[in-house]
Each structure stands twice: as C-alpha cells, then as structure tokens.
Amino acid sequence: MLARLHSPLVASPAPCSRRTAASRGDGSFLQQPRQQEQQCSRKSVAAAAAGGSADGGRPPRVSFRQPKAQPSSWNAKEAGGGRSADSDYLSELGAAQQYNINVTHGQRSGMIDSLFTGNVLGHMTDIADGSLRGYEFRSFNNIVGDYYVAPRFLEKVALHIAKNFLADAGAFDPSTKVPLILGIWGGKGQGKSFQTELCFKKLGVEPIIMSAGELEHEWAGTPGKMIRERYRRAAEVCKVHGKLSCLMINDLDAGIGHFENTQITVNNQIVVGTLMNLCDNPTRVSVGQGWMENDVVKRIPIIVTGNDFSTVFAPLVRDGRMEKFYWMPTEEDLIGILHQMYKDDGMSEGDMRTLLTTFPNQTLDFFGALRASTYDQQIRDWIKHDVIHGEIEEANENMKELGTRLLKQDSLPQFEPVDLTLDMLIAEGRRLVAEQEMVNRMRLSQEYLKPQRKMQRSMIGLSG
C-alpha cells in the first residue's frame, strides 16, 4: 500500500485522436479549442515517429473527409444552372459565343485588349484580315469575261507545264533532259503576256509573276536571291496547298539583254547564273541556308517572255535549258481575238476581217486602243457639261474642279458602251495611224541626240 503511495504519479494525457469536450453541466458540450487540436496532432505525429502512439499505442484514426476542392473553370457552373444540371461551363461558354471562333471578329479592337492590337499599325491585327501579309501569287480573278485563247498558244503552255511536272514525278527516263524554261518571244503588242495569263486561268495555275524591273537592285545579288526565293515559294505552294504554280518573268531581254552602249552589271550576271543553275538543278535551290541532304524542292516550270532573245546570254537560251516559242498570231487567230473583243457590239467575223485588211501590219494592241478611244467623246462631253460647265480652255476658271472630282471620286459617271459601227472603228484607226506616221517621220531624236549617235563603246559602258 505504501509502495503504491510512494510510486511516481504519471498523468495520462487525454487521447489526442479523440475529440474531447468539456461539459457545461446542462447536458451540452464545448468544442475543444483549435489550438489544443493542433498540439495534439503534433504529439501524435511525434509518437508515431517514435514507434508508438499518443493514445496508448494505438495507431491514429484515419480521416475520410474529402479535402476542400480548389475552384476551377473545368467544374464551374454557369449562373442560372446552365442548360442542364451536368452541363460543362466551358462547353456552355463556347456554345453561347460561337461568333468568337471567327478570328476576324475575335481579333478586332474592342474584342481583345489594346495591348495586343496596338495603336500604331491600326486596329485590325494581321490574323484578322491578312492585310499585312503579301500574297505574291496571281489567281486572275480580275480577268472577267470571255476571251479568246489561241489553241496553238494554249497547247504550248500546257505541254510545257505538263512535261515539267511529269519529269518531277519520274515519268521519263532519267537521261531525258526536259527544258525548265519556256521562252515566248515575238513582236511587240502581240499579246504574249495576256495570252499566257489566259492560259494560266484556263489551266488553274497560280503563278508568281516578275517583271524586268525586278532584275536590277542597288544591292548586288538581291535579284538572284529573289528569283530563288520565289521559286522555292512556288514549290512550297504546290506541295502544301496542292495548286499548280510556276514562275513567270516578263520582258526578260529588257532586264538582262546585252545592247550596244549599255553597261553590264553584276546583277545581270548573277541573274543569268541563277537561271542557268535552276535549269541544271531544279530541285536543289539554296537561298543561303546550310546544305541539307533532304532539302529537295519540287520542280517548278519557268515561263519568260521577250522580244528578242538573241540579246540574252547564249548558254541560257540553248536547247536543253530553254524551249523557244515564236508567237506570231495568224490571221485566224487575229480574227478570233478581235471578234471576241467586239462581238457584244454586234460586229461579225467579216467585219473583223475587213478591219484587218484596212490596217495591215498592225499589232493587237492597236485594235485594243481603238476600243478605248471610242469613249473619248463621252468623256469630253462629261467634262464640258457636268464638271467645268464650259469649253476645255485655259480661260475657264472651273478647270480645277476636274482634279477635285477625280481625286475625291465624287459623282463619277458610269459610261455606257458606245454603239460602234465599222465606219467608226476605221475612222478612229486612221487617226491612230496618222499619229504613228508622225512619230516615225519627224524623228526629233536626230536633232536632239546628235552627239550621242556618234558614241563609241568603252570599257565601262561610258563614252570618254
């Protein structure tokens, strides 16, 4: 008994795993303070680490309470309950705002923050309307109407495009050399460029068109690199977009032709070398990047136009690299083209034959100028009666009104086609012929350019 009295008294702590409560005396209980809960929790963890438990060696009770979920848009519900009890918030949002899927609407100023639209380049982003992106391909949607395509011309262009794409597909023997360039040449004003564009529209080809003015640049090498870049771009469109494409260069001889008393530049030589290299290696085109074995582009046909290819570097126009096609429309071609031009005015093929007989040795652009000049009288009457209200002369103070109306495009008329007759066309044609003869007869260059006509060729293209 005494031993039990003298033994050390050990106070057994209240089990921490049990939620103890203090009685108020009226049957109700007070909850354990949270600070005491935290202390008990720490003691239980320490006891468990020591191999025991704070509750007589028993393991702590496992809590099955679910942790509080964090708010997320994936399981959020739209105000009002949505369309159904299990409706998804993001799905409901997309269904209610399908108009915002349209990038033209979603990228406008006012729909997104001004930080992304900016105030420098305007309030329309590039992804919205593509106005900041350059599309160098021609679809010829501007050519509206029924035009005559010469069968011989269409056949030549179609064969050249077909042969090059068939060669790229391996349809020929590897030893067969298919020319990459088709050179269409002939007299001025014979419709070489326009007939080629009509062939592209008929065949569904979207080409990249270059002019002779792009074959020269202040920085040496730029035109050659531009040709290679556009060649690769055309190859990419064929491969990615599935559209036939080609590279067309208008008036090639005007850009790289060798004429008397003219200087040959480095760019002329680089352009010639670039075209020759494309003919020899049409699937290996470098624009300055490192050499890669798998960098193989699609073979793209090239079509060039010109007046005289004898001025071009001879190795470029040799057989195997360039196929030459001399375009001189026959009488049947001219009658077909002119009849297509004037058939809506009631002209027959016999009238077109008479017109050709009256003006022999005239090119197609001459007969196109005839139609444009038939509007001269209507334009003259509009200026006199509706704009300046008087005669076209220096004393008329209303002459400035013409410039104002044209710039502002204010109340511009829509002219109706003239009721043409064969006599009207012949009379207008004789006027144009008289102007041509005046230019050839006067030859004022003989008076104004006398010193230049005696120039001798020099090493640098200049006379000393």
Image (cartoon, helix red, strand yellow):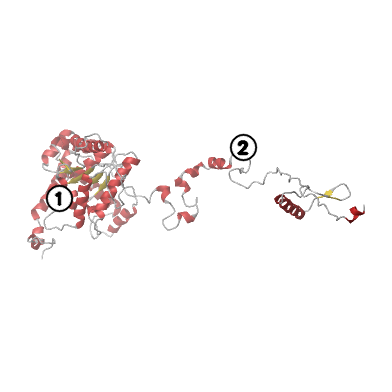
Q: Is residue 168 left or right of residue 310?
A: right
Residue 351: which quarter of the image? top left
Circle count: 2
Please determine whether, in this image, residue 207 is positioned above or below residue 461. above
Which one is nearer the viewer's eye here, 460 or 39?
A: 39
Label 2 and label 1: CA atoms lie apart by 77 Å
For mark 2, what is the residue? 86
* Callout in the foreground (2, 1): 1
| Kind of residue at badge 1 | Phe
Q: Residue furthest bottom?
A: 464
User: Of label 2 and label 1, which has the lower sequence position?
Assistant: 2
Q: Nearer the viewer, residue 432 or 13?
A: 13
Tell me what residue is drawn at x 9 percent, y 55 percent: 442
Q: Is residue 14 visible?
A: yes
Per the image, the residue denoted by label 1 is 313
Label 1: state its secondary structure: loop
88, above or below 11, in the image: above
Give residue 27's position: percent from left, percent from top. 87, 46
Task: Identify the amino acid type marked 2.
Answer: Asp
Q: In the image, 441: left or right of 386?
A: left
Q: For the residue carrying disc 2, how many other residues have a C-alpha within 10 Å: few (<14), some (14-19), or many (20+)?
A: few
> Residue 334's x, y, as percent?
16, 38
SS at mark 2 in the image: loop
Residue visible at 48% across and 47% down in the picture: 106
Q: Position of residue 48 (x, y in %)?
A: 71, 49
- How far from the left and from the top, in percent, is residue 429? 15, 44
Residue at the limit of the structure toward the right, as seen here: 1
Q: Nearer the viewer, residue 66 or 156?
A: 66
The quarter of the picture where the C terminus appears is bottom left
